[in-house]
Image (spheres, rainbow, N blue to C red):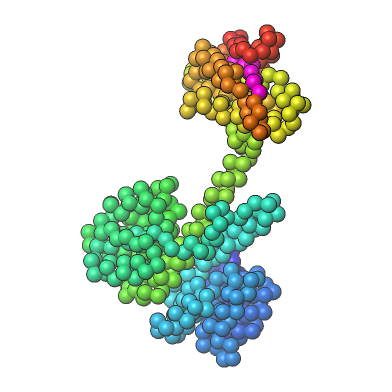
Amino acid sequence: MTARILVVDDILANVKLLEARLQAEYFEVLTAYNGQEALDICASERVDVVLLDVMMPGMDGFEVCQRIKTDPDTQDIPVVMVTALDQPSDKLQGLDAGADDFLTKPVDDIALIARVKNLVRLKMLNDEMAMRASTSSRLGLSPMSGGQSIDQLETGRVLLVDDHPRSASRILQALAKAHDAYVEPDMHAALQRVTDNNFDLLVVSLSLSNADGLRLCSQVRSLDKIRHLPIIILVEPGDEARLMRGLEMGVNDYLMRPIDRHEMLARIKTQIKRKRYSDFLRMRLEQSIEQAVTDPLTGLHNRRYMETHLHGLVHESITDGRPLSILIADIDYFKRINDTYGHDAGDLVLQEFSERFRMNIRGQDLACRMGGEEFVIIMPDTTLNVGYQIAERIRTCVAELPFTIGTGEQVSLTASVGIATIQARTDTQKTLLKRADNALYEAKHQGRNRVVMVAA
């Protein structure tokens, strides 16, 4: 994982030790020996994570962290407080200053690399979010639907898997103040719950009496529906071997027993925030893909998607010996609508026509806008005669009811439809579309407002 880590400590030996450990994991390391030097580097260099010593002369780590987090240019850089202090009040002060994580001296190698890698991933998501928000802003789009920023969505649904009643009760009590938290002592029931419900985080004890918590973690990572669910494991001191197994299989973070409440809440907050980012990016990706294959006016699939989808269906139908039919429908004399009432009225007609299309096709059929006033329906497992019945139903629903254009004014319209079906193993999407288009031309030639089917 390539990332730039800034190590800040006024003691040279401490800097060199952390630098060597991080470079062994192929991180690029920057160093600073006082608070102002660290702030200058953050302002002038790309920094992915800051490892910040608390006890420094002059400007201490708390003040440095607060300045990083209040500067709009550096506020998204994750900060790990590195301290010999191990009091809850120190962690609270760090949280108040904006710290994302904590490490206690002497720094454990496993903890160092696990924490840094986790925060590097979060920083990468942050950067991706910023880039997409900038692009959305330039396009005039809202970066986040619903009017609520991701940073405001820190309350999450957490499932704790722990079969020790006293331990589970203490953890649940701490979580309940900030999250919707639930406990499940049975591992198999826990897997079912996270599969069936929308949880933001799974916390798994590795001290289950009659089950292996790592097996549950492995099962979660193997299921497509929940493989991105963040996991924190609860580990007993001295169980480093199982901890490493967990990190290798994709566990996001861990807490060592006895569990510090403040540390637990900080780590859970980080994981939920990271999940928000991941979910948001996946949602925007899905939206981008949807926009690329959808006609913006009608909401139907566009020609690009139709041609790609039809190509695959033709191949499958010929290979499996199954019928496939398509129809092309065209609004009769549509140009008159635009010329007489304007293009806004024409758009309303196209939208209403598309809605009638949707209402008169089956779930297996695919409705697309070919372009202009031409529309296509792809009908898998459909013979020519059945396709004709669908086409006639569409033609009738267009002709029977007038279309509303603008301020209550209505206009009567008709549609012509051509149908074709696969006839030979040499058929392609082009030959199929060509035959349907020829049938449509014939319907126009015969006087419009009719369906014509071509069998060969």
Q: Indicate yes or no whether the magenta region holds residue 404.
A: no
Q: Residue at x 66, y 13 (%)?
A: 448
> Where is 438 relative to 2, above or below?
above
- Residue 415 in magenta? yes
Q: Quadrant of residue 409?
A: top right
- Image vertical order of residue 241 relative to residue 292, above or below: below
Count of numbered badges drawn on the protein? 0
Residue 433: x %, y % from top left: 64, 20
Q: Which residues are magenta?
A: 411-419
Q: Is residue 242 left or right of residue 62?
A: left
Q: Position of residue 155 (x, y in %)?
A: 43, 63
Residue lying at the far front of the rendered structure: 408
x and y percentages locating residue 262 in the rendered image? 40, 75
Instruction: In the rendered view, tell whether residue 267 sits above or below residue 389.
Output: below
* Horizontal and vertical percent position of residue 346: 69, 30
Q: Residue at x 71, y 19 (%)?
A: 333
Q: Residue at x 48, y 70 (%)?
A: 115
